[in-house]
Image (cartoon, rainbow, N blue to C red):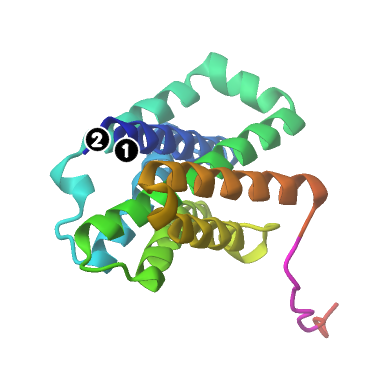
Amino acid sequence: MNTFIIIVELAATVAFAVSGAMTGLKKKMDVFGVAILGLTASVGGGVIRDIVLGVLPPQTFRDPKYAVIAVAVAFIVFMPAIHRLLLSKRRIFESVIVLVDALGLGLFTVVGIRTAYDVSTGFNAFLLIFVGVATGVGGGLLRDLLAGDMPFIFVRNIYASASAVGAAICVVLWKYLGDMLAMMIGAGIIVTLRLLSFHFKWHLPRAGGFDDPGT
């Protein structure tokens, strides 16, 4: 694995570990719960990716260094001085969690594409995009489910769709610009779309649902 991929994976792991740990703080979990959410957010997408690709046991269990990093980051976030600072102002808390979540989404999406490219035969664009999106949103999906929240990918602004757009652009550029530049552009597009959607409150069309007759 080259240095660029290691850096991207490390940055994505830290970003999602912070996101998961901050979700635990928001839910007033104990240190174990905060650590589990940080770990799940960081490695969950990679586990889903490896299962889809038939890489068994998943890389997380064969090389646990990223899991150890995720737990260490979660413990740091839980430190009294850090978590009091994060929880002191709601606006700052929300801005930080959206930023780190966007970074994790973008970076893990392109890492998923790279992994799928490395282990698959040929250049199957659908497989690359699917695995990229699954890797990007998987950790956040598991984090939200464990925290008892409706997952971001179903209700929050532009999320999975940002991952899909960035993944598609990354795959298209792969053969023309090479893997490194294509990954950087794809991740940048995902992060930008996610942050813009949060700032401007962009949403996909939503179902109206039914009114509760008891209310």
Query: Dots 1 and 2: beta carbons under 8 Å?
Result: yes
Q: Position of residue 201 (x, y in %)?
A: 79, 53
Amino acid type at mark 2: Asn
Q: Quadrant of the N terminus?
A: top left
Position of 203 with respect to 124 (left or right) is right
Q: Position of residue 30 (x, y in %)?
A: 46, 34
Position of 168 with respect to 110 (left or right) is right
Q: Residues within 10 Å of mark 1 (few under 14, many from 20)?
A: some
| Residue under label 1 | 5
Q: Which mark is residue 2?
A: 2
Quick one: which residue is furthest to the top in this view? 81
Q: CA distance from mark 1 to mark 2?
A: 6 Å
Q: Position of residue 26 (x, y in %)?
A: 60, 38
- Whether 56 is drawn above or below 104: the answer is below
The residue drawn where x is 52% and y is 39% is 19
Secondary structure at numbered mark 1:
helix
The answer to which of 4 and 69 lies nearer the viewer is 4
Quick one: which residue is furthest to the front in this view? 176
- Whether 26 is drawn above or below 53: the answer is above
Tell me where the magenta segment starts and ends, as one range.
203-210
- Whether 4 is drawn above or below 56: the answer is above
Q: Is residue 109 magenta?
A: no
The residue drawn where x is 51% and y is 51% is 147
Secondary structure at numbered mark 2:
loop
